[in-house]
Image (cartoon, rainbow, N blue to C red):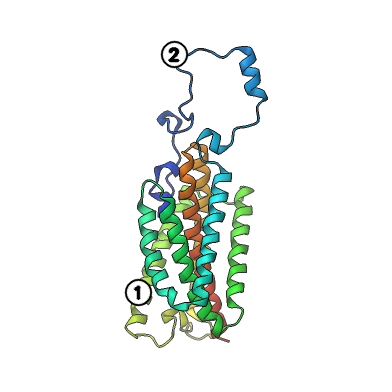
Amino acid sequence: MALGGNPVFANNKNFKEVPASQGGYINGGTDTMPGQAQLSARQLQDLYNKPSAKGAQTGRMSYDDVIMKTVFTLALVLVGAALGWFVPVLMWPGMIVGLVLGLVNSFKKQPSPGLILGYALFEGMFLGGISGILEQVYPGIAIQAVLGTLSVFLVTLVLFRNAKIRATPKMTRFFIIALSGYALFSLINFFLMVFNVTTTPWGINGMNIPGTNIPFGVVIGLFAIGLAAFSLIVDFTSIEKGVQNGVPAKYAWTAAFGLTVTLVWLYLEILRLLAILRGNN
C-alpha cells in the first residue's frame, strides 16, 4: 500500500509496505548464510537471556528513535518561534527559508539532519512571528492554537493506537483528492488577496456564506483541520510501515521531519480558524 498525502513519506519507498518477496531491510542483513557456523546451545541460551536489542544496536529505525528526534525537532521549532515572537520581522525570512528547506527535505532521498533542523528553526520563526502579530489583535489566540494542535494530535494518536482509524487505500485516495482541491482553493484565494480582489484580510475565507453570518473560512477551516488530522494518521501509518520494514535508523529523521511538517500545517489552520472566528464576533 503506497501511501500518499505527505510528500515526505510518499516519495520515500522505505515508508511503504514492502512485500516479503522483495526483501528490503526486514532481516537487517543478518540471515545465516549457507556454510556459516551454527551457534552452540550455550550461545543460543546466552542470546536468549540478553535484553531485547534497541534500534541503535540493530541499526534499524525504532519508535523511540522517531519520538526522540521529533521532540528535538519540535524543540527547535519552539526556539525559532521565540525568536519570531520577540522579533516579528524574522517572520519573512522564516517563511521563505522554511519553505525552501521544506521542499528540499521533502524530495531528498537521504535524510539530512542539518537541513531538517534548519527547517525547524526557520519555520519556527515564521510561526512565532505570525502568532505574535495575531496575539496583539486577539489576546490569548496563540495558546488556544497550541492547545488545539496538541488536542488534535493526541486524539488522532489514541485513535490510531487503538486501531480505530487506519489510512486504507480508499481513504487515502479520497484524502489526496480532497487535499488537491484544498490546495487549489488556497492558491486561488492567495492571488485574490494579493490583487485586492476581495476586501477581507482572509480573502474568500473572511466572506460570509450568503444568507448567514458564518464566514466561509469557518467551514473551510474545519475541513482543512480534518485533512491535517487525517494526514497525521497517514504519517503514523507510514512510520509503522518503516519500523516493520526495518529501515535504517537514519530515517528516523525523515519521520520526525514528516510529523513536524504536518503539525506546523495543523497549527496554522487552527490559528487561522480562531482568528476568523474571533474577528467575526
Which residue is at the front of the view, 215 or 259? 259
Quarter occupied by residue 22: top left
Q: Point out the image quarter for the N terminus.
A: top left
Q: What residue is shown at x 60% (from left), y 82% (from top)?
A: 139
Image vertical order of residue 138 relative to residue 270, above or below: below
The residue to which callout 1 is attached is: 188
Asked whether, in this view, residue 225 is left or right of residue 110, the answer is right
Which residue is at the front of the view, 165 or 146? 146
- Mark identifier at residue 34: 2
- At label 1, the amino acid type is Ile
Q: What residue is shown at x 58% (from left), y 45% (from top)?
A: 64
Q: Point out the image quarter for the C terminus.
A: bottom right
Could you tell me residue 181's position as x and y percent?
39, 65
Asked whether, in this view, residue 277 is left or right of residue 178, the answer is right
Q: Residue furthest left?
A: 195
Do the residues bearing badges 2 and 1 touch, measured as CB atoms within 8 Å?
Answer: no
